[in-house]
Image (tube, rainbow, N blue to C red):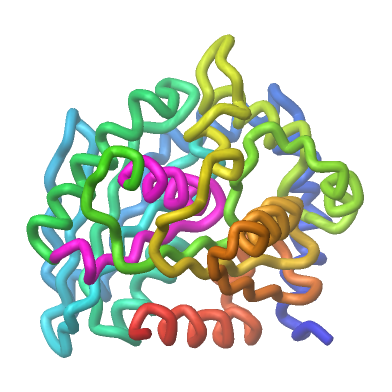
Amino acid sequence: MISKRARLINFVLRLLKVQQRLADYDTGMKFLARDRKNGPARPGRWFRKYSHTNEYHIDNHKVYEIDPKEGKSKHHIFYLHGGGYAFNIVFVHWGMIKKLIRATGTSATVPLYPLAPEHDWSQSYPVVMQAYDRAVAKYGAENITVMGDSAGGGYSLGLAQMLRDQGKPMPGKIILLSPWLDATASDPLQRELEKHDVLLSIQGAQTAGQFWAGEGEDPAAFPVSPLFAAIDKLPPLAIFAGSHDLLYADALRLKEKADTQGFPVALHVGEEMQHVWMLLPIREAKLAQAQIVSFIKG
């Protein structure tokens, strides 16, 4: 049985009709306009007090480098935030990054990558690739865990596949949190999952997927939908997904594909959990975070 707090959050989100509002194109664009006006969330007071936070820019896009002042380990997190490839980083992302730094002593790189619909994947990936190359030069590829939530999870897998295809140094590990791996949102299972999800809708996902692919481009193509690319010769990979998440279907298909190809993937499923539940202030998230920390330390 899920915790009372998790049930309460689900109830509030359903009451606010977040799923329906994001599914509607006009309302979704109003949310997007508000997001652009507010801008990305910044690292909070904890980061200023307990870490050295450096900012630099790649083509006018900010990248954060965070090094803890004490207890620093060899590990490094390269974190790609979610938000349908369209919305800025928010406070819950920074909260998750803070918890991982505190638990592992890891340093972190957090690129604020170019967002859709102003940019598509072809304009965004070069920025992230440059940030990754800098992290490799500074921390060593074998020490890096590439990870992200939702769209950031899809981005993380797509980045690893692109690094492999280009013969570049691979990260030591990959962690996908409620990953969005198929931008077409066409899996039949998603019709049933949509009834339980309080955040995501098929219509909203398909609109965002087309934004990310670019006008007139195929959202099923790589790297927009990394699920359809080869997954061999990748580093150890862990997936965290919720059984009441529209994107649970993507996690299941990636796991099935990996099993078929003999590639080991650890799939952690939160029963009755919603999208990106591992970032929320709930009991279930603490367990997932402990598993994530264990995987990073590996």
Where on the picture, by quarter, is residue 39? top left
Report the front residue among 200 and 295: 295
Please, is residue 131 above or below residue 77 in the view?
A: above
Where on the picture, by quarter, is residue 242? bottom right
* Prevailing secondary structure of the magenta residues: helix
Please, is residue 7 above or below residue 256 in the view?
A: below
Residue at point 86% right, 58% down?
196
Coordinates of residue 273 in the picture (x, y in percent):
74, 70
Give the left or right position of residue 63, taking residue 228 as reference: left
Magenta-colored stretch includes residue 143: yes
Coordinates of residue 86 in the picture (x, y in percent):
50, 35
Q: Quadrant of the C terminus?
A: bottom left
Coordinates of residue 92 in the picture (x, y in percent):
48, 63
Residue at point 72% right, 47% down?
200
Report the front residue among 257 and 203: 257
Magenta-colored stretch includes residue 241: no
Give the left or right position of residue 190, taking residue 208 as reference: right
Report the front residue among 280 and 179: 179
Coordinates of residue 253 in the picture (x, y in percent):
70, 53
Q: Quadrant of the N terminus?
A: bottom right
Please, is residue 131 above or below residue 209 in the view?
A: below
Report the front residue among 258 and 225: 258
- Looking at the rendering, the stretch of residues picked out in magenta corresponds to 140-163
Residue at point 77% right, 74% down?
8
